[in-house]
Image (spheres, helix red, strand yellow):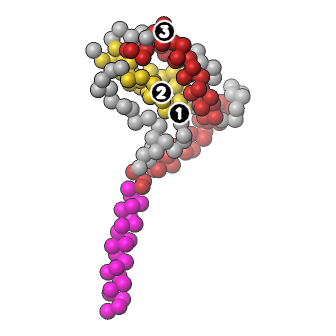
Amino acid sequence: MTRRLSIRKAVPAVLVAILAAAHADNDRENRGNDPFLHVSSAIADCAAPRGPSETAQEWLDEAHYRIERGNSCWIAGRCRLSNSYLYDKEIAESVTRRLNSLNAALQWREKTSLWLTLQRRFIYLDGCVSRDFDTARFVSALGETADVEKVIDRTTRRP
């Protein structure tokens, strides 16, 4: 009888532990500490992108590929740092300064709702832009930031 009672107490505890582990695996986090910047919000109802957040399983699935991508520019002699992800925080600071100087010319704050994700010297541009916004000029200006390899425009136009 004592043994049955112990099993009855143990089963709910095991189930709680299993459910907690399953839930923890679905939690999204910025596991790579990639800079994710919300830089403007002029367009209402523009959905926020997921950004660099991943589940634990997605992080594990990407680990080898991320290491390989990060080190490839060093191996090829195109980077001064040993991993291209090491540039991202520095680029985020530079991009923030550049954006402040660009607003007068492009009025990007008044015509966009934008998020920037920085990963391995790439800037991913997400969000919404007005129909009269010069996205190509904005992307080009971001690309002129020191150490940026590429700007990937994933914005959408809203009326």
In the figure, residue 155 lies in which quadrant? top left
Label 2 sits on residue: 116
Q: Position of residue 25 (x, y in %)?
A: 42, 53
| Residue 108 visible within the image | yes
In the rendered image, residue 153 lying in the magenta stretch gets the answer no
Q: Which residue is at the front of the view, 117 or 84? A: 117
Earlier-in-chain disc, 2 versus 1: 1
**Dot 2 surroundings within 10 Å: few (below 14), some, or many (20 or more)?**
many
Label 1 sits on residue: 35
Q: Nearer the viewer, mark 2 or mark 3?
A: 3
In this view, 5 is above or below 31: below
Q: Tell whether label 3 touches label 2 (CB within 8 Å).
A: no
Q: Mark 2 falls on what kind of element?
A: strand
Residue numbers of the magenta segment: 1-23
In this view, 58 is above or below 71: below
Q: Which residue is drawn at the image coordinates 52% and 18% (left, top)?
A: 99
Label 3 sits on residue: 104
Q: Tell whether label 3 touches label 1 (CB within 8 Å).
A: no
Secondary structure mainly formed by the magenta segment: helix
Q: Which residue is drawn at the image coordinates 54% and 41% (left, top)?
A: 32
Q: Tell whether label 1 touches label 2 (CB within 8 Å).
A: yes
Distance from disc 2 to disc 3, alpha carbons, whole Å, reads: 20 Å
Report the amino acid beneath label 2.
Leu
Distance from disc 1 to disc 3, alpha carbons, whole Å, reads: 25 Å
Q: Position of residue 115 (x, y in %)?
A: 44, 27
Earlier-in-chain disc, 2 versus 3: 3
Q: Position of residue 10 (x, y in %)?
A: 37, 77
| Residue 140 visible within the image | no
In this view, 56 is above or below 156: below
- Drawn side of residue 117 relative to residue 44, left or right: right
Distance from disc 2 to disc 1, alpha carbons, whole Å, reads: 8 Å
Report the amino acid beneath label 1.
Pro
